[in-house]
Amino acid sequence: MSNDNTYVPPRIWTWEAPSGGAFASINRPVSGATHDKELPVGKHPMQLYSLGTPNGQKVTILLEELLAAGHTGAEYDAWLIRIGDGDQFGSGFVEANPNSKIPALVDRSGAEPVRVFESGAILMHLAEKFGAFIPQDPAKRAEMLSWLFWQMGSAPFVGGGFGHFYAYAPVKLEYPINRYAMETKRQLDVLDKRLAETRFVAGDDYTIADMAIWPWYGGLVKGWLYEAAEFLQVSDYTNVLRWADEILARPAVQRGRMVNRTSGDPATQLHERHDASDFDTKT
């Protein structure tokens, strides 16, 4: 340790104890199951194992949009995975997703179950399977894929970067908060400039790129993530706010945002979803 309390990394890093802060108890430098626990299986073709975080909402929004569009094969059971309790390290979940992150989908519509993990992969699997919310024109498809993967590459700087150091770290540190606030605002500016040109992110049509981006960046400008709306001056991003409100007005988005949610107003939480009628108790 230097005289100015600057951290000096050791020559070889070792894991000695949790570092503190939110989620410290479930962070570890190794992968794999910590306990035996099989995943439940419901009656529908799609079995989702998730939590209503922004990444989880992407998939439930798409599933609800598919059902609203008449794709009955998208009926699903949504099972709650409580990451704070370590459910993602159960043997069944690790079999569905060796990376132990939500969401994980098991598609049981065919002769053999197909596992799909990583939210972007799940969105593409479902959109291609049902031929919905994904452009067929090659140029439009390329634009949509670019924005979808923009989200996959950019959001970790918002969540694991800004969100962690601003909201969850055991101590507030100026350098990482400033570093990731700057990057988060740069990303919001990228999105705001794009949405000044187009109604939706990939163009005139609503696609899985919007469904991927909205829970993160729509959540930021609506003030749902990290209680950081004032800090980030989200009122500057008028085009993102317009887009966020338009998507929020969609009934399927409102339903999808409820599924597997365990925080906020209890009226907006549906811990598990096994039938469309499950929403009736929330209206």
Image (cartoon, rainbow, N blue to C red):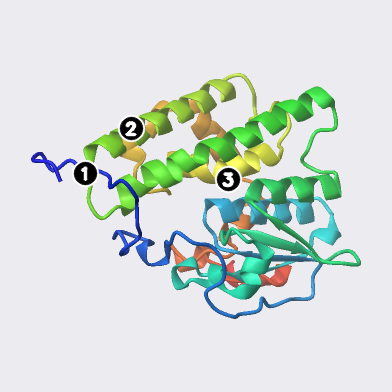
Q: Which residue is mark 2?
A: 179
Given this view, does label 2 or label 1 mark the residue nearer the observer? 1
Task: Measure the C-alpha gap from mark 1 to mark 3.
Answer: 44 Å
Badge 1 amino acid: Tyr
Badge 3 amino acid: Leu
Say whether residue 196 is left or right of residue 127: left
Q: Residue 9: horizontal and vertical position, in percent?
A: 27, 44
Circle 2: element type: helix
Badge 2 amino acid: Arg
The numbered disc on residue 7 is 1
Question: Between 210 and 123, which is closer to the camera in this rendering?
Answer: 123
Task: Measure the C-alpha gap from mark 2 to mark 1.
Answer: 18 Å
Q: Earlier in the sequence, mark 2 or mark 3?
A: 2
Circle 3: element type: helix
Q: Earlier in the sequence, mark 2 or mark 1?
A: 1
Q: Residue furthest right?
A: 111
Q: Residue at x 57, y 42 (%)?
A: 214
Q: Residue at x 67, y 68 (%)?
A: 95
The numbered disc on residue 248 is 3
Q: Is residue 150 visible?
A: yes
